[in-house]
C-alpha cells in the first residue's frame, strides 16, 4: 500500500474532512474509491477541491465527532497500474546510471520541487526526474543528464555536501 494523503481535520458538522493529498492522482478521491487507514477501510462518498486541499465525505463518517476522530489519519491505497508513470516506490533504492554508463549513486529519496521532482542520490547529487530515460523498478534508472551536472558535486569537495552547503 502507498501513502496517498492525510486527513488534516474536520470540515463542518456533517462528517466531512479535509484531506491533503500526497499524490497528483486525484482519482484516488473518486466516488467509491477505497482508501485504507491503519485500522480500517474508508470509502469515498463525495470529494471536492477546496483551497489546495479536498473536502471529502466517507461512508460511515456522519458527524463532526467521527470526522474529528480521523484527524491526522494517514490514507493508503494500492499502487495504480500505469506504465507511463514513474512511481516513487519504484525509484527508491534503484541505481542511477548516466548516458555514458557511469554509475552515479542510489536513489535515497524523491524530493518534491515545483519545476521537476528530484532524485536525491546517496552521493548527495540531485537529478531532475525529467532526465530519466529508462527504469527497471527498484533496480536501475537510466538518465540522460547534461554534461557537467555531476561535476558540481565533485567540485563541492569530498564531504558529499552540495555546493553552498556547510559541511
Image (tube, rainbow, N blue to C red):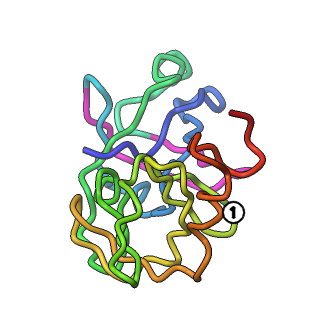
Residue 16 x %, y %: 55, 35
Query: Taking 34 as reference, is 72 left or right?
Result: right
Viewed as shown, does residue 111 lie left or right of 106?
A: right
Q: Nearer the viewer, residue 164 or 142?
A: 164
**Secondary-structure class at tag 1:** loop
Quarter holding residue 35: top left
Q: Residue furthest right?
A: 164
Residue 7 lies in the magenta-colored region: no
Instruction: Tell me if residue 49 comes above or below residue 56 in the rendering.
Output: below
Residue 29 falls in image quadrant: bottom left
Along the line of sight, the residue nearer the viewer: 105 or 6: 105
Residue occupying the point 45% across, 63% down: 25
User: Which stretch is magenta?
Assistant: 40-57
Q: Position of residue 60 (x, y in %)?
A: 35, 31
For the point 56% across and 21% down, the residue is 64
User: On the image, numbered disc 1 is attached to which residue?
Assistant: 114
Q: Quadrant of the N terminus?
A: top left
Please identify the quadrant where the C terminus is shown: top right
Residue at point 51% right, 24% down?
Answer: 72
Residue sitting nearer the eye, 83 or 19 = 83
Q: Dot 1, how many residues are within 10 Å of its Cα: few (below 14), some (14-19), or many (20+)?
A: few
User: Is the residue 163 above or below the residue 74 in the image?
Assistant: below
Amino acid at each position: 500500500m502507498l501513502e496517498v494523503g492525510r486527513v488534516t481535520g474536520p470540515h463542518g458538522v456533517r462528517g466531512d474532512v479535509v484531506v491533503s493529498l500526497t499524490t497528483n492522482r486525484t482519482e484516488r478521491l473518486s466516488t467509491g474509491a477505497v482508501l485504507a487507514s491503519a485500522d480500517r477501510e474508508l470509502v469515498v462518498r463525495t470529494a471536492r477541491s477546496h483551497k489546495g486541499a479536498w473536502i471529502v465525505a466517507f461512508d460511515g463518517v456522519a458527524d463532526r465527532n467521527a470526522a474529528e476522530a480521523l484527524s491526522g489519519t494517514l490514507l493508503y491505497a494500492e499502487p495504480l497500474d500505469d506504465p507511463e508513470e514513474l512511481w516513487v516506490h519504484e525509484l527508491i533504492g534503484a541505481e542511477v546510471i548516466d548516458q555514458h554508463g557511469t554509475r552515479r549513486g542510489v536513489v535515497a529519496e524523491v524530493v518534491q520541487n515545483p519545476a521537476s521532482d528530484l532524485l536525491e542520490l546517496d552521493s548527495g547529487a540531485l537529478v531532475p526526474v525529467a532526465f530519466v530515460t529508462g527504469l527497471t523498478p527498484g533496480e536501475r534508472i537510466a538518465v540522460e543528464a547534461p554534461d557537467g551536472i555531476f561535476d558540481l558535486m565533485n567540485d563541492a569537495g569530498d564531504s558529499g555536501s552540495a555546493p553552498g552547503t556547510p559541511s
